[in-house]
Amino acid sequence: MSYDFEFKQLLRAYRNGVISQSTFEAELTWLEAGAPTNGNGNGGGGFKAFGRTYKSERAAVVSFLDKVRAGEASGGEAFSAWAEVCTTDCIRTGIRMVAEREAYHSRVFAQRLAELGGEARAMVTEAGRKATAYLGDPSIPDNEKLLDFTKRVGKPEDAIKPICEFAALLKEDLSTKEALRLFAEDELSTAKWIWDACAALNAPKQHEARASDSM
């Protein structure tokens, strides 16, 4: 990342009141010295999260928000596409609610990213495009889509663990920290609902399979 880009991010964050003058001056000193900026209380060792080291806590947050912003926007589009072709009355409205939840997460994270002086760089991934195409395919039964989701995401509590662990690391950005706590709760709620719906809609087939095996 170039000096000019990093400096502009710092200046934007300072002008928006996201970081104090002392924090701005400290990070600028590190930047001018060619060392990692230090906004996380880790000395000069950077900020460690997701198996890598960032220049500062703020840099880690900006990177995370940008990726999640794009991911949640993609998720909103995918669930919206599913809702349009959903033929199972008992889950259609729930799917719409999940789509709205994903979309609002993206909007809130985009706003927070801008407040921190970050730029929206992450784009929809190929995996995201495939997910939208899959969920929007009217030829695939809803119960199969539910099964696919549970297999890809895994257990609800495990799925949100990285969010919770990252939030626990944040010491300075308390605004993002609290937002991530709510985000994790939303994601947990969504995953649990889909798991419950999956169990309910696939129970008859599972029962038939067991009955067939016993013959």
Image (spheres, grey):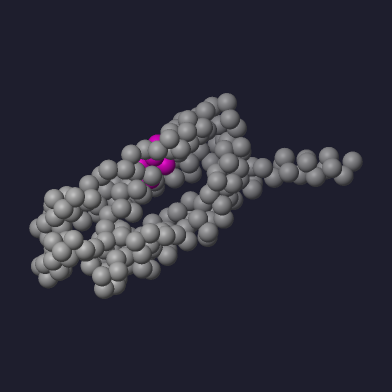
Q: Is residue 145 above or below residue 167?
A: above
Q: Is residue 52 above or below residue 169?
A: above
Identify the image quadrant of residue 206.
Answer: top right
Residue at image position (78%, 40%) is 208
* Quadrant (top left/top right/bottom left/bottom right) for the C terminus: top right
Left or right, 73 with reference to 192 = left
Q: Nearer the viewer, residue 144 or 14?
A: 14
Q: Nearer the viewer, residue 55 or 14?
A: 55
Left or right, 173 with reference to 206 = left
Q: Nearer the viewer, residue 208 or 124?
A: 124
Q: Position of residue 117 (x, y in %)?
A: 18, 53
Q: Which residues are magenta?
A: 72-78
Residue at image position (54%, 41%) is 91
Main structural element of the magenta stretch: helix, strand or loop?
A: helix
Left or right, 205 with reference to 153 = right
Q: Position of residue 191 (x, y in %)?
A: 51, 52
Q: Position of residue 184 (x, y in %)?
A: 42, 58
Residue at image position (61%, 42%) is 147
